[in-house]
Image (cartoon, helix red, strand yellow):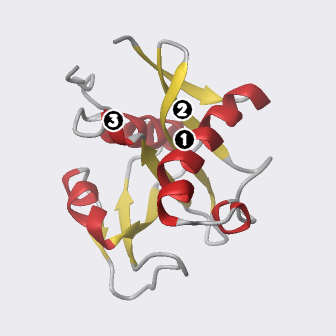
Amino acid sequence: MSFKTIRAKEEFERAGAYYVRIQAMAKKYGITLREEFDENDGAKCHYIVILDDEFPIATCRWFETSQGAAEIGRVVVLPEYRGKHIGKLVVEEAERWIAESGYNKIEISGREEAVGFYEKLGYSYNSAFSAHSHTFRCIYMEKYIAKNNIKFKNSDISE
């Protein structure tokens, strides 16, 4: 397997992000396209896509919030690629891009089942804020990073 991380800028690259979201979440949980694609998707949104050769296997998105932070969301890995640290890889690439863009606070509204995953990546639960989701039970998590100075080890991905 040959994994490649891209910051989707062209429509065909964004289509890869949409494909993963539809296959791994919308289809599995019966989420309509209208529910899956909200007002945060589109031109103001940034997408990370992980490819296995040229096939999209994981994605996430990020956008600026009204409070001047960045929010990561829609972190999805195709089922057959889970357990190989690809979710970590996609979130870390989003964090790098966010730091390069000058943000120092990252917010995530994560599904309850994913809280441990985000905690391992340095996110903390903040009960002062509520998470937004009408599909899943979610909680609000946050992380502070140094602007333009975020460093990660090269992530090892098991094959």
Would residue 22 appear left or right of 75 to someone viewing this image? Answer: right
- Point 35% across, 60% down: residue: 143
- Point 72% across, 55% down: residue: 41
Q: Nearer the viewer, mark 1 or mark 3?
A: 3
Q: Quadrant of the C terminus?
A: top left
Q: Position of residue 33 (x, y in %)?
A: 70, 60
Looking at the rendered structure, the kind of residue marked 3 is: Glu
Q: Nearer the viewer, mark 3 or mark 2?
A: 3
Q: Earlier in the sequence, mark 2 or mark 1?
A: 1
User: What residue is pinned by disc 1?
Assistant: 20
Q: Earlier in the sequence, mark 3 or mark 2?
A: 2
Q: Note whether 72 is above or below 15 in the view shown.
A: below
User: What residue is pinned by disc 2?
Assistant: 49
Q: Position of residue 142 (x, y in %)?
A: 38, 66
Residues packed near mark 3 inside 10 Å, few (<14), some (14 to 19) or many (20 plus): few
Q: Secondary structure at mark 3?
A: helix
Q: Secondary structure at mark 2?
A: strand
As measured in the structure, the alpha-carbon distance from the residue carrying label 3 to the one carrying label 2 is: 16 Å
As measured in the structure, the alpha-carbon distance from the residue carrying label 2 to the one carrying label 1 is: 9 Å
Q: Secondary structure at mark 1?
A: helix
Would residue 18 appear left or right of 157 to someone viewing this image? Answer: right
Residue nearer the viewer, 4 or 94: 4
Q: Nearer the viewer, mark 2 or mark 1?
A: 1
Q: Earlier in the sequence, mark 1 or mark 3?
A: 1
Find out whether the residues at labels 2 and 1 contact each other: C-beta distance under 8 Å: yes
As measured in the structure, the alpha-carbon distance from the residue carrying label 1 to the one carrying label 3 is: 12 Å
- Point 32% across, 32% down: residue: 151
Residue nearer the viewer, 55 or 64: 55
Residues packed near mark 1 inside 10 Å, few (<14), some (14 to 19) or many (20 plus): many
* Disc on res. 80: 3
Q: Position of residue 92 (x, y in %)?
A: 38, 38
